Amino acid sequence: MKSGIHPEYRFVVFQDASADYRFLTRSTVKVDPSRTVEWEDGNTYPLVNLEISNASHPYYTGQIKIIDSAGRVERFNKRYGARKKPVKKK
């Protein structure tokens, strides 16, 4: 590899805050050097917070949230009017 053009590839801990889940992997993601965490092996690694991961995503957990889309459609039609069908001329 050519030196000086590639990002640093190092171990990073990713933490899903909503599921209290962490995993250690290698990444080139840029992190704040002040955010670190001590891992189970006793070493200190940079920490990246995630909003969602496989531990909290509805597809992987099987907990699909149902959204009231009917109410949204009714609200849209009330606000902007229902679209009228064009009249066909014979």
Image (cartoon, rainbow, N blue to C red):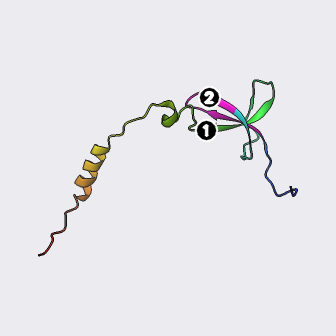
Q: Which mark is residue 83?
A: none
Overall secondary structure of the magenta section:
strand
Q: Is residue 49 magenta?
A: no
- Residue at 74 percent of width and 47 percent of height: 28
Pick out the residue farthest to the right. Answer: 3
Residue indicated by mark 1 = 50
User: Which quadrant would the C terminus be assigned to in this image?
Assistant: bottom left
Residue 47 placement (x, y as % from top left): 71, 36
Residue 85 placement (x, y as % from top left): 19, 64
In-image side of 86 versus 35 (left or right): left
Pick out the residue farthest to the left. Answer: 90
Residue indicated by mark 2 = 21
Crowd band around label 1 with a 10 angstrom C-alpha radius: few (<14), some (14–19), many (20+): few
Tally the numbered discs.
Answer: 2
Residue closest to the eye, 30 or 61: 61
Residue closest to the eye, 18 or 86: 86
Q: Is residue 15 magenta?
A: yes
Q: Amino acid at mark 2?
A: Tyr
Q: Amino acid at mark 1?
A: Leu
Question: What segment is highlighted magenta in the picture?
Answer: 11-23
Q: Callout 1: helix, strand or loop? A: strand
Q: Callout 2: helix, strand or loop? A: strand
In-image side of 50 versus 84 (left or right): right
Residue closest to the eye, 78 or 61: 61
Q: Quadrant of residue 1?
A: bottom right
In-image side of 40 versus 55 (left or right): right
Residue 65 placement (x, y as % from top left): 41, 35
- Residue at 28 percent of width and 53 percent of height: 76
- Residue at 75 percent of width and 27 percent of height: 39
